[in-house]
Amino acid sequence: MGTGIYIQGGRHVSIKDVTSNNCSTAVHIVDADELEVNGLYTKECHKGLQLDNCWDAALTNLDIQTKNNDGNFKEKLLSCLIRSLINEKF
């Protein structure tokens, strides 16, 4: 049980229609610009998608069911988005 897809560095990275079951991290991307993830389906993974230092990312058609799905994923994602917008404006 490890990472399904790991990408480090790159520009115009595109990932389409990935399915991952029972892994620690389905997709882990580090230092990528102009990233597109279209169609990521995970089940029983600890982390569905992990982005580190990725800019200009388009994320669509995500169906992420984590192993410890306690309902906090959407709240954490919204919190990060709000923090990013506040930092951008001020």
Image (tube, rainbow, N blue to C red):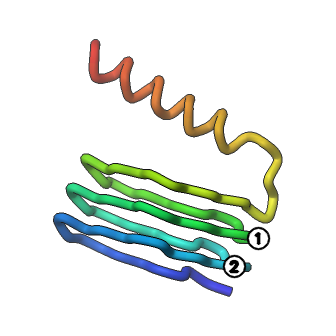
Q: Which quarter shows the N terminus?
A: bottom right
Work out whether 11 lies above or below 82: below
Query: Residue 24 location, x and y as percent?
Result: 66, 75
Going from the N terminus, do you reach mark 1 or mark 2 first?
A: 2
Left or right side of 60 for 70: right
| Residue identifier under label 1 | 44
Query: Number of marks in the image?
Result: 2
**Outermost residue to the bottom:** 1
User: Few, some or many C-alpha atoms within 10 Å of disc 2 (few <14, some 14-19, many ≥20)?
Assistant: some
Give the SS element for disc 1.
strand
Residue drawn at x 73%, y 79% is: 22
Say which of 24 and 26 sits in front.
Answer: 26
**What is the three-letter code of the residue carrying label 1?**
Glu
Q: Which quarter shows the C terminus?
A: top left
| Residue identifier under label 2 | 21
Q: Are marks 1 and 2 in contact (CB under 8 Å)?
A: yes
